[in-house]
Image: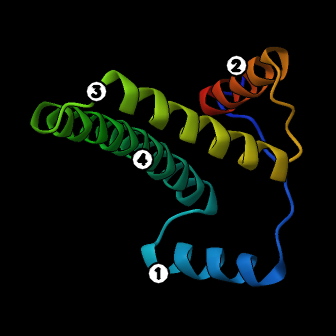
């Protein structure tokens, strides 16, 4: 009969070991059961965090649409705002050592999206 679990080894500071062992004793669980529950809770936390972030972004978009509807910008104002935002973006990129050519911008976007998927 083959094993239905695998052993996972990792190191943590002694204080964390003490906390995990105390929690396991308090809840009358094994450390393995406690660890599995921690992973499930963290997965739910990540899902909720991503949903909250998406809701926040959609809320900002809706607010911007409502503002635009209340106070439409002229073409001249839109160009001025676009230039202001581009200047701000270039300043922020320079502070972080990011080049502002399209190749570098695409690389940064790709890296950010890849990090969010993992």
Tell me what residue is drawn at x 55 percent, y 39 percent.
85
- Of labels 1 and 2, earlier in sequence is 2
Q: CA separation, marks 1 and 2? A: 33 Å
15 vs 107, nearest the viewer: 107
Give the class, few, some or many, for how many residues have Cα within 10 Å of label 2's Cα (few <14, many ≥20): few
Q: CA distance from mark 4 to mark 2?
A: 40 Å
Viewer-side label of 4, 3: 3
> In percent of the image, x 72 and y 20: which residue is there?
110
Disc 4, SS: helix
Residue on which disc 2 sits:
1
Decide which of tag 1 and tag 4 comes sooner along the chain.
1
- The residue wearing badge 3 is 74
Earlier in the chain: of badge 3 and badge 1, it is 1
User: Which sits earlier in the primary sequence, circle 4 or circle 2?
Assistant: 2
Q: Please, which colouring scheme is shown? A: rainbow
Kind of element beneath mark 2? loop
Please tell me which residue lies in front, 59 or 74.
74
Q: Position of residue 51 (x, y in %)?
A: 34, 38
Neighbour class for label 4 at 10 Å: few (<14), some, many (≥20)? few
* Labels 3 and 2: the sequence-earlier one: 2
Measuring from the top left, give residue 35's x and y in whole percent.
Answer: 59, 55
Residue 4 screen position, x and y as percent: 64, 27
Residue tagged by mark 4? Answer: 49
Question: Which residue bears the numbered disc 1?
Answer: 26
Q: Name which quarter of the figure residue 66 lies in.
A: top left
Task: Count residues near mark 3 (Cα–Cα under 10 Å), then give few for <14, some for 14-19, many for 20+.
Answer: few
């Amino acid at each position: 009969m083959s094993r239905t679990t695998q052993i996972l080894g990792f190191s943590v500071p002694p204080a964390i070991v003490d906390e995990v062992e105390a929690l396991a004793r308090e809840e009358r669980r094994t450390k393995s059961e406690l660890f599995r529950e921690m992973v499930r809770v963290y997965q739910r936390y990540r899902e909720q965090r991503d949903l909250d972030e998406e809701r926040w972004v959609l809320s900002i978009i809706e607010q911007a649409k409502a503002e635009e509807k209340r106070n439409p910008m002229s073409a001249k104002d839109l160009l001025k705002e676009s230039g202001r935002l581009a200047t701000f973006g270039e300043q922020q990129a320079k502070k972080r050592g990011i080049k502002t050519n399209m190749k570098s911008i695409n690389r940064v976007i790709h890296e950010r999206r890849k990090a969010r998927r993992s």
